[in-house]
């Protein structure tokens, strides 16, 4: 087996590698960012048609209300003409002119209402299609955020469990080996690699010179010439 000091450092490295892996998983959790951006793009793109549908529906309601008011006035004036309550010629003429004007307004409103009723269904269908798209994206974002929250809680607990092992493992590492390791882990995040049977660095694949292999076997702290990670030889059956 390789030197006990390097082996204890390797055990610490396994814990730190696991902690790094958990942090990476937490950082890469899908919180629906891309879907939220897609939602905003759809929202912006479909805003004109959605606003138009609302505007046309409001306009149709207003014109129908206006038409109802005109029809009520026509009924009132026609009633006055034929119920015998008005006998003055000027009043009758005035009412007739009012009726003519209201009939023209009613006819104009009829045309406008018909035009709106013809156009509105198509516009509303486009707006509804947009709303369905937006609803679907909102649901996807909500689902991904909920899953990410659950996964993050799981990873946090796992991180704490693994982290609780670190102090004990660290205490077993000789200080003269621990110092260069901790300096490396600050820069590289994963600070250690094993030498494979083919005498290559397990992290970057670079060839490890025979002289370096022998020094590692002797318990010396040696670095991969390519990725600068501390090297260790893991004997078969040892974890």
Image: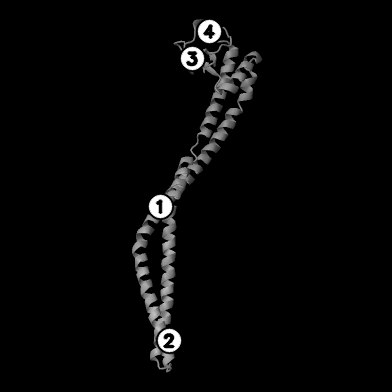
Q: Is residue 143 visible?
A: no
Q: To which quarter of the image does residue 228 belong? A: top right
Please give the label number shown on residue 205.
Answer: none
Residue that label 2 marks: 94
> Is 11 positioned to the left or the right of 69 in the image?
right
Choose between 2 and 52: the one closer to the eye. 52
- Within 10 Å of disc 4 (Cα), the crowding (few <14, some 14-19, many 20+) is some
**Rendered residue at 40%/79% (across/down):** 102
Secondary structure at numbered mark 3: loop
Which residue bears the numbered disc 3? 201
- Return the residue at label 1: 130
**How far apart are labels 2 and 3 at the CA level?**
105 Å
Q: CA distance from mark 1 to mark 3?
A: 54 Å
Task: Return the disc, 2 or 3, that comes first in the chain's sequence.
Answer: 2
Q: Nearer the viewer, mark 1 or mark 4?
A: 1
Measured Cα–Cα span from mark 4 to mark 3: 11 Å
Q: Nearer the viewer, mark 2 or mark 1?
A: 2
Count of residue discs:
4
Q: Is residue 79 above or below residue 140?
A: below
- Across and down, in percent, residue 174 comes to 64, 14
Q: CA distance from mark 1 to mark 4?
A: 65 Å
- Residue 112: image quadrant is bottom left
Q: Secondary structure at mark 1?
A: helix
- Binning the other alpha carbons within 10 Å of mark 1 as few (below 14), some (14 to 19) or many (20 upward) gives some
Where is residue 166 shown, x and y percent of the image? 61, 24
Location of mark 4 (residue): 212
């Amino acid at each position: 087996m390789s030197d006990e000091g390097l082996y204890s450092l390797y055990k610490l490295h396994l814990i730190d590698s696991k902690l790094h892996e958990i942090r990476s998983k937490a950082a890469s959790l899908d919180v629906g960012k891309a879907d939220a951006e897609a939602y905003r793009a759809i929202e912006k793109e479909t805003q004109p048609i959605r606003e138009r549908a609302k505007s046309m529906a409001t306009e149709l309601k207003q014109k129908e209300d206006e038409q109802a008011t005109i029809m009520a006035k026509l009924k009132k004036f026609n009633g006055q003409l034929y119920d015998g309550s008005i006998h003055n010629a000027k009043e009758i003429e005035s009412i007739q002119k009012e009726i003519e004007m209201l009939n023209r307004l009613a006819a104009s409103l009829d045309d406008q209402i018909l035009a709106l009723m013809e156009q509105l269904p198509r516009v509303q269908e486009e707006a509804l299609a947009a709303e369905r798209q937006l609803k679907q994206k909102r649901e996807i974002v909500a689902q991904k955020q909920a899953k990410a929250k659950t996964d993050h809680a799981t990873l946090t607990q796992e991180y704490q469990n693994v982290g609780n092992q670190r102090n004990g493992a660290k205490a077993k590492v000789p200080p003269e080996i621990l110092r260069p390791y901790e300096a490396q882990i600050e820069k590289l995040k994963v600070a250690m690699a094993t030498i494979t049977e083919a005498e290559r660095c397990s992290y970057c694949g670079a060839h490890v010179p025979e002289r370096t292999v022998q020094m590692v076997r002797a318990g010396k702290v040696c670095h991969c010439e390519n990725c600068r990670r501390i090297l260790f030889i893991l004997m078969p059956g040892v974890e």
